Image (cartoon, rainbow, N blue to C red):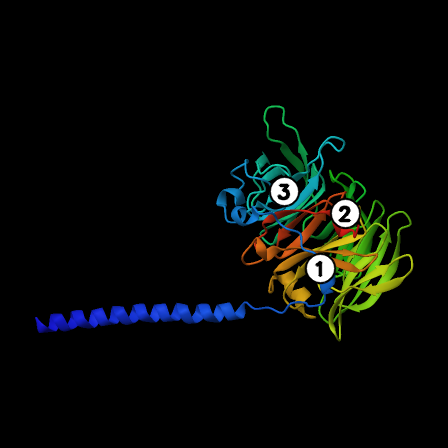
Amino acid sequence: MQNENIKKIIITVTIILLIVGIFSYFIFFNKENNNDQSSDNIGSFPVDEVQNISLGNDWGNLGNNPDYLNNQDPNNPIPILRKISDNPVAGAIIFKQTIEKDDFYTIRYMEKMTGHIYETKTNSLTLERISNKTIPKINTTTWLDENTLFFNYLDNDVIKTYSATLTSNATSTNMDLDGVYLQDNIQNITYINDDLFYLVDSGSNSDVILTDIENTKPKQLFTSPLREWGIDNIDDRRIAFTTKSTENILGYLFIYDSITKKFSKILGKRTNLSTLLNEDLDILYSQNTKLGLTLSLYDFESETNTDLPIRTFPEKCVWGKDTPNLYCGIPSQKIYNYSLENWYKGNILFSDEIWSINTETNKPIKIVSLTDSEGWGIDATQLQITDKDDYLIFINKKDFSLWGLQVFSGTLAGE
């Protein structure tokens, strides 16, 4: 009997010690985690030029409302900063269906896990699935226009790329998604005019292929001895070729003219180069220097360079279409020379603020801090802006959720 009482006492003491230990562990490590969350601010903005735009009095309530975040209540007011999709998104597009009449935009996107296509309006929280064709585990999706897209996914270590078109279905409210497969293992793809322009690794070289969206007339344009290129559409005749950014490697930017069939070197011998061009061939670019990563503008016409008072990557920016502005996600953490390559790989992630930079005055204006809406922050990428510079969409690299932001373009242009 005495032995049984001793056993009970030992068990009780053990349980008490275990509970105390667990409680102490959480107190200690929560304190450590809270201390680790502090980050270096970039500290490079002129304080008197910072202008915040209010998200509205309703944001605090809406941001914590699961019905709002899941778009389940169409009667909620539309906030300035809006989470459009909780589920991971492979790529999106924003457009006006009727340019003359609509005072709102339509946003379409493809889900990563299912390949289903959804759309919503900027004046409504209603979310509608318009294509239910299931294509699992989409990697990236690029939209040429509201009904034309291409996407890729991995199938047994083979990169599959599909060129697709959305068409109306006479027997259903859903649209059909039809198309054709392109060549396997396409490393990089963009568009030029109404055609697809892509690179395939042939082993020792890169083969550059041009084809129509139905893939009926593929033809090899040329072969490059370099295999690691980033390619981006500039306009209906020109493609930007940038050597893929790698730490301590000198990078180059070339422009290929599809009419003259010639390459022109624009930038060269810049370490860890990354670029973003507009149709005027003005270039936003980052590079590594002895002072750290810098962000600069290259004016094509005057052939001059201007350093910007911000630190971010061109991949986190978009050129304005109706103003002389750039719109960028600016990390609140400090950026180092090695940050870009690690960000590509997902080894580091950032928490951004959205800024506008007037490229004529070099004046930055803060639009919003994204940590106000998402507790763990938003790492903005794949930014798109409307023709009037009044609505911005972007994807959070942390979870691939899709976001929309109303932009007050007149104020941001410095008017």
Q: Which mark is residue 31?
A: none
Q: Are marks 1 and 3 in contact (CB under 8 Å)?
A: no
Q: Are marks 2 and 1 in contact (CB under 8 Å)?
A: no
Residue 69 in the image: state x and y as whole percent.
53, 45
Residue at 30% x, 70% y is 18
Q: Which residue is mark 3?
A: 109
How many residues crowd mark 1 within 10 Å: few (<14), some (14–19), many (20+)?
few
Q: Nearer the viewer, residue 64 or 168?
A: 64
Residue 168 in the image: state x and y as whole percent.
65, 28
Name the kind of residue labelled 3 in the image: Tyr
Q: Nearer the viewer, residue 71 or 363?
A: 363
Q: Which SS class for mark 3?
A: strand
Q: Which residue is mark 1?
A: 50
Determine the CA span between mark 1 and mark 3: 33 Å
Choose top left, top right, bottom left or bottom right for residue 122: top right
Of the residues under marks 1 and 3, which one precedes in the sequence? Answer: 1
How many residues crowd mark 2 within 10 Å: few (<14), some (14–19), many (20+)?
few
Q: Which residue is mark 2?
A: 410
Name the kind of residue labelled 2 in the image: Gly
Residue 221 in the image: state x and y as whole percent.
83, 50
How many residues crowd mark 3 within 10 Å: few (<14), some (14–19), many (20+)?
many
